[in-house]
Image: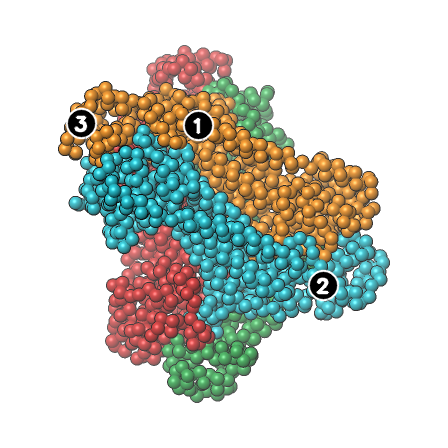
Chain colours: A green, B red, C orange, D cyan
Amino acid sequence: MQSHDKYYGKGGILKDSAQEILINTAYKYDTQEYDFLLKELNYVDLAYAIMLIEQNIIPENDGKVLLKGLLQVKESIDSGQFDKESILGDIYNLKTAMLEEKIGDIAGWIHIGRARREAINMAFLMHTKKDILDLLRVLTRLIQEIVKKAKESIDVVMPDYTYLQHAQPTRFSHYILTFVYPMLRDIERLLQCYDHFDCSPGGSGSVNGTTLPIDRERLKVLLKFSHIAYHTRDAMWQVDIPIEAASSITMMMTNISRFTEELLIWNSTEFNLVQFPDSLCRASVIMPQKRNPYPLAYIRGIAGKTIGLVSNFASYGKVISGSPDNRIFIYADLPNALKMCNGALTLFTTVIHDMQINDQQMRKYAEDDFIYATDLADYLSYHFSIPYKQSHKVVGKVIRTLIESHAHPSDITVQLLNDALIDIVGHSIDIDDQTLAKIINLDRMLDARKTPGAASQKEVELMIDSIESSLEEYNNKIESKINALNYDDLIELAKKRSQSL
Amino acid sequence: MQSHDKYYGKGGILKDSAQEILINTAYKYDTQEYDFLLKELNYVDLAYAIMLIEQNIIPENDGKVLLKGLLQVKESIDSGQFDKESILGDIYNLKTAMLEEKIGDIAGWIHIGRARREAINMAFLMHTKKDILDLLRVLTRLIQEIVKKAKESIDVVMPDYTYLQHAQPTRFSHYILTFVYPMLRDIERLLQCYDHFDCSPGGSGSVNGTTLPIDRERLKVLLKFSHIAYHTRDAMWQVDIPIEAASSITMMMTNISRFTEELLIWNSTEFNLVQFPDSLCRASVIMPQKRNPYPLAYIRGIAGKTIGLVSNFASYGKVISGSPDNRIFIYADLPNALKMCNGALTLFTTVIHDMQINDQQMRKYAEDDFIYATDLADYLSYHFSIPYKQSHKVVGKVIRTLIESHAHPSDITVQLLNDALIDIVGHSIDIDDQTLAKIINLDRMLDARKTPGAASQKEVELMIDSIESSLEEYNNKIESKINALNYDDLIELAKKRSQSL
Amino acid sequence: MQSHDKYYGKGGILKDSAQEILINTAYKYDTQEYDFLLKELNYVDLAYAIMLIEQNIIPENDGKVLLKGLLQVKESIDSGQFDKESILGDIYNLKTAMLEEKIGDIAGWIHIGRARREAINMAFLMHTKKDILDLLRVLTRLIQEIVKKAKESIDVVMPDYTYLQHAQPTRFSHYILTFVYPMLRDIERLLQCYDHFDCSPGGSGSVNGTTLPIDRERLKVLLKFSHIAYHTRDAMWQVDIPIEAASSITMMMTNISRFTEELLIWNSTEFNLVQFPDSLCRASVIMPQKRNPYPLAYIRGIAGKTIGLVSNFASYGKVISGSPDNRIFIYADLPNALKMCNGALTLFTTVIHDMQINDQQMRKYAEDDFIYATDLADYLSYHFSIPYKQSHKVVGKVIRTLIESHAHPSDITVQLLNDALIDIVGHSIDIDDQTLAKIINLDRMLDARKTPGAASQKEVELMIDSIESSLEEYNNKIESKINALNYDDLIELAKKRSQSL
Amino acid sequence: MQSHDKYYGKGGILKDSAQEILINTAYKYDTQEYDFLLKELNYVDLAYAIMLIEQNIIPENDGKVLLKGLLQVKESIDSGQFDKESILGDIYNLKTAMLEEKIGDIAGWIHIGRARREAINMAFLMHTKKDILDLLRVLTRLIQEIVKKAKESIDVVMPDYTYLQHAQPTRFSHYILTFVYPMLRDIERLLQCYDHFDCSPGGSGSVNGTTLPIDRERLKVLLKFSHIAYHTRDAMWQVDIPIEAASSITMMMTNISRFTEELLIWNSTEFNLVQFPDSLCRASVIMPQKRNPYPLAYIRGIAGKTIGLVSNFASYGKVISGSPDNRIFIYADLPNALKMCNGALTLFTTVIHDMQINDQQMRKYAEDDFIYATDLADYLSYHFSIPYKQSHKVVGKVIRTLIESHAHPSDITVQLLNDALIDIVGHSIDIDDQTLAKIINLDRMLDARKTPGAASQKEVELMIDSIESSLEEYNNKIESKINALNYDDLIELAKKRSQSL
């Protein structure tokens, strides 16, 4: 049969097949850019055919032929042995043309009671569900790797930075856990988003139901959805859930972007806080000395790629409800974005695993600067009842004096302190230099940070325990959902039915 | 005291106060654009002072004076009687300058153990929590109004549209519930987002805790947070949660945008499906006949305003973690956006309430077109075992014939049908004209749509019941959260302590 | 040779080749997603090799071999006969591996004095220049088609719409020219953008020049650039120009989006103003009667796809200047976006060409409504010295009366007018019903719109002339630029040199 | 008169005034958020009144009263003495209510032949034209300041960075000029954008002209526009030009964002390349030692604020053409964004002016690393005919050896080089250690970078000259345009006419 004669509707409502330019633009897009959905699309058809048979909507023998045909189509799809003729219009028609080739007119039963949009939409949801779960899985692995690093480096002391300036003493382990907490929220958000993708629109008729005895519940079960997207018109035209997925990954990648950005800075010769092995560096083509941390740039780039996605998807959605363009581009864009993020996270997990920490350098920066300033001012206020703003001014002035005389931070003396106190508060205090030295001692300052969530060893260990126990729970949930997405029994059932009928 | 002398840090680490250009740009922004947070900021300080006293971090008498001062500052804020001197740098310093003016150096205690970022951040979270709950409240009211409209119009029949073309028969009530289901998901998303805003960063020290005996739990309780944002550095530098709020409202407004867009179309002379009263129309200045549905344009515009917000917030967040610019602009932008959406939803609730439905016109469009086509093809397939693609072609051809002869859709005959059947399937069928008329009868088609979530009266009523019961649950949750955000007892406690000490 | 041994830098600064995960994510991206640049990349290498020979930077004989090798590589690229091994890292290394395979170590000369970024960047600019010109070409064709339609429909009268409500009488030709004027501005913007892409970064060394006698001017000429991007570091790290291209197409597509959206509305049964042939419609799989204007939905979707692109590209650019991620993703994203828009415009040109205008329906809507209101109020004010707000009120009141009594717009009488005048202005006027009929006559109203740019036939014709003359000028400019981008002489020169040396 | 009675259209087409919720949302927005346009709006009315008089569209005496009234309104606006009653609906009606209060019904003439949208749109364009020119002015000043810095630091040597790793030797002056070249392109883009704002829509009738003898040319001249936006419907509904302005500033701020980001890094203790005076630093409230470079964070934040603006504006524009929401929000958003960027640039100019460069540290980093690697490999290839990939490998290997033995970069010897050469290329070369030292000498490497646009002193000076001459030209153009936007003569003319009539 000529391709143009296979064109749906030709001879019916349409006199002509499509023009070349339509085939070469829109139809080419719809047959090629999201053809990875063909696999799930065939599951959808198999389940639909089984339900049609069970409900006596189609004749038994035709049903048997239909299932046989669809199982043959599965072979073709799995082996990639088929043409992607743009003339057919989209992957749905592409697939049914394959079916027609195998079983002739009986293939025409597959269209009963169902819009193409429903079928592709189902396939899209099933595919994306898998992508979301896979992403959740690599996200938990990344967290595990960061937590492992935090455990290993519990003794590593470094300055905390604000404005990229030395702020207060911290632990490297406390620092990197900064990025884990948003990831735990990412997991929550992705799981909620998953729930919204886990609602079957199957059996919606065109858009407001059908007079045929379609069984929506059966479709849901066969295709491993947890819920039915109840209102059929909502089910068909939802615009929120792809935006929800897009925004979930935007948040996730924004967090990772700032982490990679910091690692790029820590990796500079000037900072020299972390290093990466050759197997994660790229040589410059021109500069023989360069070992470029290309993975970090790549990962940050992927983050940039997600910014704009929500605007994009929201723009698709900002059209009246019965418009196909609110979803057609998302069929390709969302799975591609999820897979790209998956790759970025997997790569980042290796980056974290292989990262070497320069603990001596970290400690040195912490020791060679005035990061004791807050603790000293706290001491003055707490022990000598000086309102903090005054203590702050006193310590600030002492540090200014030390800086102006090019002294080392450890050169601070009780004398200097008392000079400033007299000048600003009007009286001196009675402490000795040993006490002063103790106050500004790095390890003491860290151990004394005992507020919940602070940088003391005990608190960091508590947080690690807590994260690990959350993770275990999330992991179980994710793995159990992944296991549920197995369509082998559907295939088995289709095989059995195709023979037994 | 000269303004410049009040400049924080001057005389301490800083020799000079700020330059004019810094005052006139950044500082002007930080003192004026989110000054609505001052109210909550003072609650934060009151709670902080109470905790400092309870933990013996500050002397009892100083604490008493401090509380008195803060209560006086509350008066000034409530009455709006204070200068917004940009020189002070931001609302935090503005407020502490007010405090200093009232109680002198003792005001300096308020800074102990706490970054300005923590204080403003707390105020921002508290303010935004209220904004989110208020938005949730108006969202539930909007849903109630739509559901009410759906109930009233349960008998109103109209054509469903895809591509703005007549598709299948539906009920107006089924149609408008399309927009309710995404709103229910919006509620879920906003509630999850609320939970993330409901975590107190209070007591984080600068960023990794403090050596002072700060009581984080107490701060949480006093300021009505449900949880503590445990990891102190995460608590200080979260970039995900404003993005989460922004994306939640983007989804919400995208749904509302398409609804308003459709109402604008339904309101055209050509469609004439809905009308609005004069009190919701705006006159044209030049064209005397115009009654413009300005509210719809305004609401859609607000939706457009939210698109871009996620990109914007994600861009703020895509900087290294210790950077203040990841939050300063959001202090103003997010509350403003939430309030704007609140207004749009409230206005839209009135629009829905006052909208008149032209039920005769709706029915006429449904009757004067071929929206029976699917049901007829279903009938052919289901009752005469013709694969659907064939039935589709048959019915399509009949309709093409009717269109070409300028016949009315109801002019379809068994003869025409059988001609097409013979031509395409090779045989005719045995039905009479009465049966045919019955198949394509509008009310029958609707009643027979019995799949779950379909447009039959029973299903629509079921959905209305289900929505109403969800709504009640959500309403209780929202109102109980709103009630919890009452700070009167904090004020009482502060008053009591300021006297009793 | 093992793939891993071909890895650039291995054995030099790098001990190891890349890890699998790096190869399977970043390197896979960089070898596969913008491999369409390979063709131009080889032109860049050919020109570079010629320049190196001319400047005696490489030995004559090596140069001859190098050119021969590159010409062989051209064959491989043209025929698509080569592996895309991700291990090589990116298309640059992929291509030089092909070269090495053909000519061995001499291939190593191609890297002298040049970063991989310069080479790929050049190829990207060359490729994108072509894409921009191609887009400009189809944009001018689209304008021509719209202008042709405007000419053909100069007599077609319709109501102008604001808020989708009947506003004033207009011509269809005036209406569709609305969309042409922004397109003329699009041409200007795209031409300015083209100029920024037409600056050669060739010969920048790594980033701040080189000590070798590289000839930048020669590279520019050989590769058909019009200018040199002078400052070498700017040349290497420009982030503005991809954003400029993205924003240019965003503006272009936003204009086209609103046009397609209006055509979708005009195409509804209710409006019935325009129709499209079967060859531009898509059948519904389920609804036999549907002839969906899928091209319009597709084109509008492409417009949605461009929204978000500027945020995306700006996010890439919002990193410190020496970061590769500010460009790597754009290598694929920008050409793909330009090609997608090109397809959308080409398709839209056919849509316009094939669109049938329902001129009777258009006129009917114009006649059956109160679109004469402004002209009538103008008349009252202009001829009877009544301040316009009063005339507006008078006419408004008359129309309200007519509507309330369900009268036709043409039922307006002098009596009704005078009643309202007496009520509002306090006196009547002296005109007869014929005069009134003349005032509100559709054709008179249109002919009398003589302000520049208005809807009178004369003005519309003037605008058409003016657009056509602009178009001719633009066309000449675009075609001459397209002709200039011919690299045949470069190939010829390379062939000659490869033999003659 | 009661506010509600002043409501436009009431008593005419509208029976009722607006509902409270409409007044408190949309109308509040339209009366308060862009009220800064009132000044220009009155100029627009004055010019319009003068034209109406000249064209005899309104009676002479009424015209005189009208002008007098408008001049009185000018006083009220200038002094800020007027109510902003939301009930009136928008700033247009607000202003005409002021006029009515002063001159009664004669005020009603101002509405003849003109839509509110035209009037506000004109005011918006005039206001934005000024904002764009002001921005251009501060942009040129910023460039001047950077160029001045470049001149002063012509001798300052530093490492160039890619991936934040030492790349090659450069000059600080060459480095900072990186950011000037995009600014020159910004100027071009803003000037083209300005031209599109400089087209008067005045005299468009409602949207397709008018039958009144309106003089569009006269309006253009009186209001200092350079061109007429010819097609009246385009003139009324342009959506591209605000997007163009938004994208122009997005590009500008993206460039500035990366510059500020680098300065934040250069300002860290670890890099210590630049420093800022106390008057540009902000003290931490808690940490006494901190001198935070707040201006840089603020400026970068403003850049983030512009990302998302194009999506936002394009979303407004993605609605059918006659929709007011495609512009109403932009009336406030665009001027606010332009002013915010203006402030950021002015602040940044001071930051650059006051920035101290640590030239010794810069040179030290350049000397203490292997940034000579490229030049050495170039030398090997150029002087000893070794294909570059081999030289690259040789030098890479030598450096790896030096790093592994913890040697200083200057410890490289001919012996080490020859060892690697023998190993990789198979032979040694004949140079002495003095020659080697000369090759890798920092100053020699820089002076020898003679390619156009490179980092040699001569080339940097050439570029500075060229920039300065471009700047002068741009400055003249900008200042002449600013001078042209003077409306004093319009006021004078109005005064004269109001008396002389």
Cα distance in 3D space between marks 3 and 1: 38 Å
Q: Is residue B303 above or below residue D179?
A: above
Per the rendering, the mark at residue C462 is 1
Residue shown at 49% from the left, 60% from the top: D349
Cα distance in 3D space between marks 3 and 2: 94 Å
Total numbered circles: 3
SS label for mark 1? helix
Q: Return the residue at label 2.
A: D444
Q: Is residue D394 left or right of residue A74?
A: right
Circles 3 and 2 on the same subunit: no
Circles 3 and 1 on the same subunit: yes
* Residue farthest toward the front in the current orientation of the protein: D500
Q: Nearer the viewer, mark 1 or mark 2?
A: 1
Q: Is residue C157 left or right of residue C72?
A: left
Q: Quarter-wise, where is residue C459 in the image?
A: top left
Mark 2 is on which residue type? Arg
Residue shown at 61% from the left, 72% from the top: A360
Q: Is residue B86 above or below residue D4?
A: below
Residue shown at 59% from the left, 53% from the top: D466
SS label for mark 2? helix
Contact check, label 3 and label 1, Cβ < 8 Å = no
Contact check, label 3 and label 2, Cβ < 8 Å = no
Q: Nearer the viewer, residue C172 or C351?
A: C172
Q: Return the residue at label 3.
A: C429
Circles 1 and 2 on the same subunit: no
Mark 1 is on which residue type? Leu
